Amino acid sequence: MSFWPMSRRQLVAGSQVLPLPEQDPCHAAYENSNDLWHPEFQGSASPCTKALGVPTCGGWGPSSCGFREKRGVLVLDPRLLQFGRPSSSVPALASSPAVSISDVDTVREGHESELLRNLAEEFPLEQGFTIVFHGRRSNLDLVANSVEEAQIWMQGLQLLVDFVTSMDQQERLDQPGWLSDWFQHGDKNQDGRMSFGEVQRLLHLMNVEMDQDHAFQLFQRADASQSGTLEGEEFVEFYKSLTQRPEVQELFEKFSSDGQKLTLLEFVDFLQEEQKEGERASDLALELIDCYEPSDSGKLRHVLSMDGFLSYLYSKDGDIFNPTCLPIYQDMTQPLNQYYISSSHNTYLVGDQLCGQSSVEGYIRALKRGCRCVEVDIWDGPSGEPIVYHGHTLTSRIPFKDVVAAIGQYAFQTSDYPVILSLENHCSWEQQEIIAHHLTEILGNQLLSTTLDGQLPTQLPSPEELRRKILVKGKKLKTLEEDLEEEEEEPESELEEAELQLEAQMESEPQELSPRSKDKKKKSKPILCPSLSALVVYLKAVTFYSFTHSREHYRFYETSSFSEAKAKSLIKEAGNEFVLHNTWQLSRVYPSGLRTDSSNYNPQEFWNAGCQMVALNMQTAGLEMDLCDGLFRQNAGSGYVLKPDFLRDAQSSFHPERPISPFKAQTLLIQVISGQQLPKVDKTKEESIVDPLVRVEIFGIRQDTTRQETSYVENNGFNPYWGQTLCFRVLVPELALLRFVVKDYDWKSRNDFIGQYTLPWNCMQQGEPILPPLARTPALGCLPNTVPRPPFQVTAIYTCSPRMASASIQPPSSCTSAPGKG
């Protein structure tokens, strides 16, 4: 069975292949910016693979698609839950990075792929499919010999993806694949046994530097057969001895009278004293024992073993992110302007702003990560069909109707709450009519084309009222009042209609032009088409002149856009006025045009002023997107987060640059205890071992933005122990985000990024919570999966014990303010 992957880093434009910038080293083995690789997928001897009915046969491929063809072999190993290119020495693994099934998000049919649609003349779309990865990895497009074979692989891969997704932490731990993977990496001569020399090599692969005598003691203890080598279960015992966590055992024994178990009362004491659960601890203890104690006898006796205790700590209930903030927990019946709204800038771009690729994939990925406001730049296209691209640049172009179709399909897969289409319309009258036609025909009932009840509203509707609706934001010929009054009436004359249209064109985003240039620009603009204007209901785009002008001339359903420079200036000059403006009208902030590399600004300072739609280049990983993901992690990832009370109060005195009482400061103590199985930064160096340190950063108002870090642990990425307490005093905790960063200390150069986790202050759980798996951002250091990845590699990185107190309580003498970030 043969497949041909088409790189998402390439675009077929006629006979020209346009490579995209290399962003993800994790996929270097599968994709090349100049080549189209043609692998042959083969079934292994694995019973699971045979169950999928996968045949092995020769291949064929498109001969005139504008790519240079390359061939290879991919092997799916359901036992290890991964696929990759085999090597002669280790058939089950890839000679170049294998891809774990846990890295796969979903499998799509061929007709959903832009690239496969472009090559539809070469083969039936039904023979193609796409493997979509989590995060920012490029997709993998494949073509099978037949429709039947494509269906087998799609169903089989999706079955494995669903299986991995449904596994809980304990089930992942019980999977033999990853531990077998470690064994095969350590067993250099592949004889099924590991000598002590091979174990020493394995320790380096596992990011451990250990005293040779201690390592030999562990080796001998595990060598039950006394053969001088480790096999099967002996290696498992050796691994267990490596992964013991004395600091967790110490915590367990602190509350356990016999060191073997926690009785119900002892577990209640732990929940009250360490986890700060209060009065609900008794009922919660019973629930947690029933959920996490592995033995039936323990459940009957209402006791928690050490294994159950660990399962609890590694679960969502032991997570630092408060589980009560995971579902929809906020009031969703407030007007739209009362929420932060996850927003994207130039959503169609998956690369830079000058030569990058435009793709519907940008919309799919943004919507699937919970983005609720996407941007569409529309221009006149060939054959009367509007196109989407970054005007006056070398970015590629995609049909507007494909964008609308993708939005219609993916708008509500992650969140049921409304999606906003921010239209930048540069089209002629004729193609504007086509735009309106596509919106109404493709989106159907999803598109909101009139007020919810047909009546004139007094405030914006709520996310709850707008569930599963798509709203158009753009220019509009008339006011909403005029639309409702004259909904059935025709214009009195063509001249009157033209005058109204020209007047509407005067309301556009301010440009840095001379008065003469502005006049010329306005006169050259096409007239707005009434059918497109009518689709703008609650989100009429208007030009911002001043806060006074907005109060006197604009209505609540009109919205203004601000460049990042303009918004920064307004916050400094009139911060409180900006806050008050955002209590009754929506604001959108967008990146500077000078950010041609698709970099981002810090969104926090605009959230501090209550700006709702702070648009980011979501294709660019980094600190800014970490903050965005952290804020919108709460409330079921719905893309809507209710702003704090003082940013919704029309009489608010809050100034983001000069916050004053009655806002109460809080003190936060974080004890960074330990970590486990941190990944290597540079896996090409077998002898390289990380020297990890933990940095805790706080982002909020300028006075609260600060960071502190632990010392580094030399040569231990496997089970580093810090045991250090960091202390922070925060003036406005309602706006604060916490970011935990793990770095590899390097005295010669900048510390290397390992991973991060960001969450809102108000979603942090007190006690002895565990950080969930860290995000390893590709732009900051994506790690090729060249060595096995056990379940705990980036789970339970360290334990944090936040202690919060009011400002009236004096922090310990060691609690000093860290210098703020510049």
Image (spheres, rainbow, N blue to C red):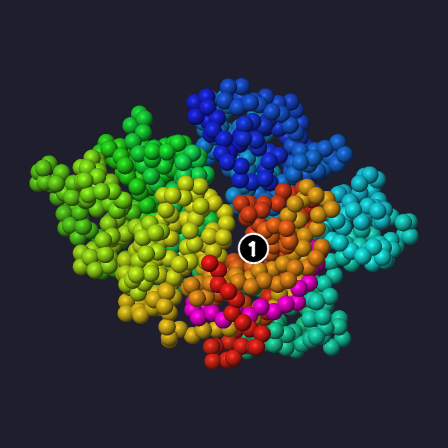
Residue sitting at the far top: 63
Residue at 63 percent across and 67 percent down: it is: 724
Q: Position of residue 130 (x, y in %)?
A: 53, 35
Q: Position of residue 339 (x, y in %)?
A: 36, 59
Residue at 78 percent across and 46 percent down: it is: 201
Q: Give the camera-side residue of 301 and 235.
A: 235
On screen, residue 593 above or below 295: above
> Could one spot residue 219 in this view of the protein?
yes
Q: Quadrant of residue 583?
A: bottom left
Q: Position of residue 586 (x, y in %)?
A: 30, 56
Residue at 48 percent across and 77 percent down: it is: 806
On screen, residue 737 above or below 476: below
Secondary structure beneath label 1: strand
Viewed as shown, does residue 779 lie left or right of 639?
A: right
Residue at 44 percent across and 39 percent down: it is: 352
Q: Is residue 406 magenta?
A: no
Viewed as shown, does residue 36 lie left or right of 494?
A: right
Q: Which residue is mark 1?
A: 756
Q: Which residue range is magenta in the image?
A: 716-736
On screen, residue 35 above or below 426: above
Tell me the kind of residue under disc 1.
Gln
Q: Give the camera-side residue of 416 and 388.
A: 388
Viewed as shown, does residue 180 lie left or right of 26?
A: right
Category of crowding for the residue at label 1, using alpha-carbon neighbours closer than 10 angstroms: few (below 14), some (14–19), many (at least 20)? many
